[in-house]
């Protein structure tokens, strides 16, 4: 087993709150263990372009509380080609980098798997995505912050809904996963939550709204963007069925990606950042560091990138019970 002396860290794909905390943990854990640490700017595109910089403890000072990623992130069409990955490997060799820590989601880990297969470089992944849709970890970095952002926004929207007897359809992020919608829906007292994993029963939703219309002065419907029809169509359907309702649509959009990470995300990122460095030193590769039942666990990339399509039925049942 080759001794690890120099490592590099990058962030790839969509940004998520807590990525900076993970970068900080990787850099400082690397230095603590006697390693030289480099940062790759703009993800895999930075590897291809050779945009790689040395990092020290000071370079990650005062970033744990910042959203986004100081290393920037970008999608790289060139890295998807063999020629691009070969160029990335040549840039790594020039700096004598022995291993990588990549922070991102399924696209990030898919690229890492291909890179390992072709060029035999050790890589450990850290799950950084607000969707929480990776296998091998209870929570991904950024998810807790994202749902708290949604909760804060919906609480404010309900103030207006209450004042004007309005029904708001709120569309949240979640192209392939409804986990943001489901948890934020429960915590904001939503009348219904529509997610891509489940077939929408519009008849049941309309009956529920009709049943409760005399008891409530505000109503909130949470819709994941990946739902079959989306927030606009849902709002139109409700308006058609209840022309007396004042129906409004609010699409939260990219506000959910930004902001200061919560304590939970900062601690999660710190734990996984340290674990990823220690894993490389121990000789691990091709795995994602995650947290399961409070303990750090490692999952092969091939299993981690499989989206979680099964939703906790107890959570959907709670939505229905508490919508009375």
Image (cartoon, rainbow, N blue to C red):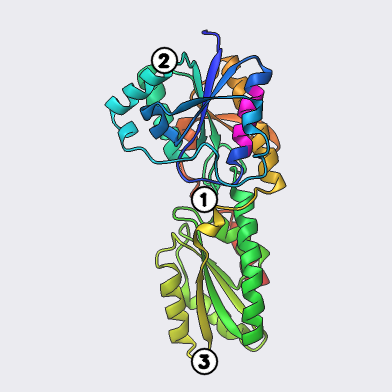
Could you tell me which residue is drawn at 52 percent across and 50 percent down? 310
In the rendered image, the vertical position of residue 276 relative to residue 211, given as above or below: above
Q: Nearer the viewer, mark 1 or mark 3?
A: 3
Q: Nearer the viewer, residue 100 or 177?
A: 100
Secondary structure mainly formed by the magenta segment:
helix
* Mark toward the start of the polypeptide (1 vs 3): 3
Structural distance between the alpha carbons of marks 1 and 3: 37 Å
Q: From where the camera sits, is residue 57 visible? A: yes
Q: Which residue is mark 1?
A: 310
- For the C terminus, the image quarter is bottom right
Badge 3 element:
loop
* Mark toward the start of the polypeptide (2 vs 3): 2
Could you tell me which residue is drawn at 58 percent across and 40 percent down? 19
Badge 2 element:
helix
Residue 4 in the image: x percent, y percent?
55, 13
| In the image, residue 27 lies in the stretch drawn in magenta | yes
Disc 2, disc 1: CB below 8 Å?
A: no
Residue 52 located left or right of residue 221:
left
The magenta stretch spans which residues? 21-29
Q: Which residue is mark 3?
A: 244
In the rendered image, the vertical position of residue 225 relative to residue 157, given as above or below: above
Residue 269 located left or right of residue 301:
right
Structural distance between the alpha carbons of marks 2 and 1: 42 Å
Residue 58 in the image: x percent, y percent?
66, 29
Residue 78 in the image: x percent, y percent?
31, 34
Could you tell me which residue is drawn at 61 percent across and 53 percent down? 259
Disc 2, disc 3: CB below 8 Å?
A: no
In the rendered image, the vertical position of residue 191 relative to residue 68, given as above or below: below
């Amino acid at each position: 087993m080759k001794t690890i002396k120099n490592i590099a860290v990058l962030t790839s794909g969509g940004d998520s709150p807590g990525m900076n905390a993970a970068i900080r943990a990787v850099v400082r854990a690397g230095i603590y263990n006697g390693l030289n640490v480099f940062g790759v700017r703009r993800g895999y595109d930075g590897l291809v372009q050779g945009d790689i910089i040395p990092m020290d403890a000071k370079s990650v000072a005062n970033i744990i509380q910042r959203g986004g990623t100081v290393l920037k992130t970008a999608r790289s069409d060139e890295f998807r080609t063999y020629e691009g990955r070969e160029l990335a490997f040549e840039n790594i060799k020039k700096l004598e980098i022995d291993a990588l820590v990549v922070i991102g989601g399924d696209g990030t880990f898919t690229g890492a798997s291909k890179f390992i297969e072709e060029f035999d470089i050790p890589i450990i992944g850290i799950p950084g995505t607000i969707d929480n849709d990776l296998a091998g970890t209870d929570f991904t970095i950024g998810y807790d912050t994202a749902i708290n952002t949604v909760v804060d926004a919906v609480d404010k929207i309900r103030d207006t809904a209450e004042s004007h007897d309005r029904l708001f359809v709120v569309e949240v992020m979640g192209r392939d996963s409804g986990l943001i919608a489901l948890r934020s829906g429960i915590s904001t007292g939503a009348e219904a939550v529509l997610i891509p994993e489940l077939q929408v029963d519009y008849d049941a939703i309309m009956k529920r709204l009709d049943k409760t219309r005399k008891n409530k002065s505000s109503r909130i419907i949470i819709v994941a963007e990946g739902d079959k029809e989306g927030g606009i169509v849902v709002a139109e359907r409700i308006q058609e069925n209840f022309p007396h309702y004042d129906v409004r649509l609010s699409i939260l959009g990219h506000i959910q990606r930004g902001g200061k990470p919560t304590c939970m995300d900062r601690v999660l990122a710190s734990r996984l950042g340290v674990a990823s460095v220690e894993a490389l030193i121990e000789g691990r590769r091709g795995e994602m560091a995650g947290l399961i039942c409070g303990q750090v666990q490692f999952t092969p990339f091939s299993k981690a990138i499989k989206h979680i399509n099964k939703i906790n039925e107890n959570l959907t049942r709670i939505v229905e019970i508490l919508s009375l």
